[in-house]
Structure formats: C-alpha cells, structure tokens
Image (cartoon, rainbow, N blue to C red):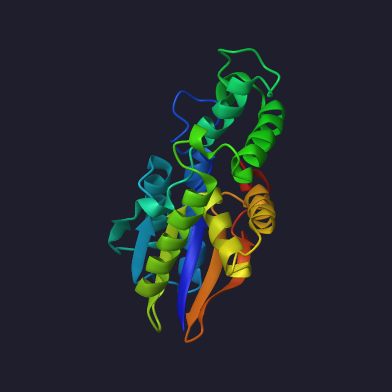
C-alpha cells in the first residue's frame, strides 16, 4: 500500500507583522519531525507542499532534520483558507463585538481571537453568506479533495509521499476520509471543525492508499514533541 503523511506546518508567528513565517519553535518542531521520521526509516519518494512560506520553511526544516534530498513540489491545493478574510467578514457585520478598524489577528490576545475565530468559522461553513468570501467553504473542501487525490495518486501502490500543509486543509482531508459521501454538509462541517481545533503544529496524519481507496490510519501524531515544543497555534 502507498502512504501519504499529512504534516501540519510548524508554529507560525501569531501577532507578528508577517504571520506566514515560522517562529523559532516552529523551526525546531520541523527539524525534530524530520529526525523522528528518519529514525523510523521514513524516506519520502515525493514531498508536496502548499505555496505558503510556512509550508516551505517547514519542509526545509524537516529535510534538514531528516537528511532528505527529495525534490519538493508545490501544490497550492494544500494552502490554508484565508482565515483573516473569514474573520474580517464577521467583523464587518458587527457581530464580533469589537470596533471597526481593529486588526483582530494582531490586536487581540489569543483567547479573544479564538472566540471570534470560532464564530467566524461557524458563519463561513454554514454556506449562507458565500458571496461575501473570496473562497466559499464548499470551494475550499473541493480544492483540498483534489489535492488529496493527487497526493494519493503520487503515492501509488507502494510509495511514501509527505505533504506539508496547514490545519484547515488537513482537517478537511480527514473529514472527507471519515465521511467520504459528505451527504450532510452540517455533519461534515462539525467533523472538520473538531479535527481543525486539535491539530498540533508539525503533527503527522497517516493515510494509507490501497486497492479500495484511501483511508485514514492515524491522526495528529506528535510523539516527536515534548512540553515546550508542543503547540496548537
């Protein structure tokens, strides 16, 4: 069977001028993961990543830690959704409870931002206000499913593919694997939200690809991390 390893990027720089940069902890998480996989004799046949900087830097850190020389291919289908845009759409309605002009991702502490973020996500996944977003939730899910299909095809019958992405796309991939029909959008959205909330920075989710298709084998492995290097945001 083929194997696809879905890796969430290392910790980014919350509250900084440029969020899309790994923190020092994020770099360390990436190197630790690469070394941990190498100790288990995991050498990828292909490495795919989104085209965000935090994806590139995580892949670089993993390669340094694992001693890989595998070429890296960019697949923008693994990019994170525009979380700032999703939060701003809620903020513009006044429902967030904060004054206009406030930069929520920079001016709020983590607890307040998380509260607003959860409200914004509920609104986005509901599908009622799709026209207000550059990418609807349904379009996001379709994009990720396409990227997952490409990764599984690349793994083939016996290869190993490492994918470096973000919590949102990995959660969407997991929800699709657990509920492949997606007949009930509300159920799919709840699954996605639950996976997304608990995905650890630099964690690994294993997907096996066999004759009957792709199946999620493990979710959110992070045995390479210890107290100070274990982060969720």
Q: Residue at x 46, y 70 (%)?
A: 4
Q: Residue at x 57, y 49 (%)?
A: 201
Q: Residue at x 67, y 41 (%)?
A: 122
Using the image as rendered, state which of residue 77 and residue 208 is in the foreground. Answer: 77
Q: Residue furthest bottom?
A: 211
Q: Position of residue 104 (x, y in %)?
A: 59, 22
For residue 19, side relative to residue 224 (left or right)? left
For residue 71, side relative to residue 66 (left or right)? left
Q: Position of residue 166 (x, y in %)?
A: 50, 49
In which image quadrant can residue 117 be found?
top right
Residue 107 seen: yes
Q: Position of residue 38 (x, y in %)?
A: 45, 68
Q: Residue at x 53, y 61 (%)?
A: 173
Q: Position of residue 155 (x, y in %)?
A: 39, 75
Residue 226 seen: no
Using the image as rendered, state which of residue 211 and residue 52 is in the foreground. Answer: 211
For residue 97, side relative to residue 202 (left or right)? right
């Amino acid at each position: 069977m083929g194997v696809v390893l879905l890796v969430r990027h290392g910790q980014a720089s919350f509250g900084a001028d440029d969020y899309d940069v790994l923190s020092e902890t994020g770099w360390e998480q990436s190197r630790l993961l690469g070394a941990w996989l190498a100790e288990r004799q995991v050498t990828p046949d292909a490495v795919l990543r989104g085209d965000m900087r935090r994806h590139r830097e995580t892949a670089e850190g993993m390669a340094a830690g694992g001693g890989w020389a595998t070429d890296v291919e960019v697949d923008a289908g693994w990019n994170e959704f525009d979380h700032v845009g999703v939060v701003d759409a809620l903020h513009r309605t006044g429902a967030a409870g904060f004054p206009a002009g406030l930069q929520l991702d920079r001016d709020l502490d983590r607890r307040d931002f998380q509260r607003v973020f959860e409200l914004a996500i509920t609104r986005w996944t509901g599908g009622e206000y799709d026209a207000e977003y550059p990418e609807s939730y349904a379009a996001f899910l379709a994009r990720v499913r396409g990227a997952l299909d490409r990764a599984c095809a690349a793994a083939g019958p016996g290869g190993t593919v490492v994918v470096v992405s973000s919590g949102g796309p990995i959660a969407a991939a997991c929800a699709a694997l657990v509920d492949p029909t997606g007949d009930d959008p509300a159920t799919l959205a709840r699954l996605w939200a639950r996976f997304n909330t608990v995905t650890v920075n630099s964690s690994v989710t294993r997907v096996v690809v066999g004759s009957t298709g792709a199946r999620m084998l493990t979710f959110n492995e992070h045995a390479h991390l210890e107290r100070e290097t274990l982060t969720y945001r």
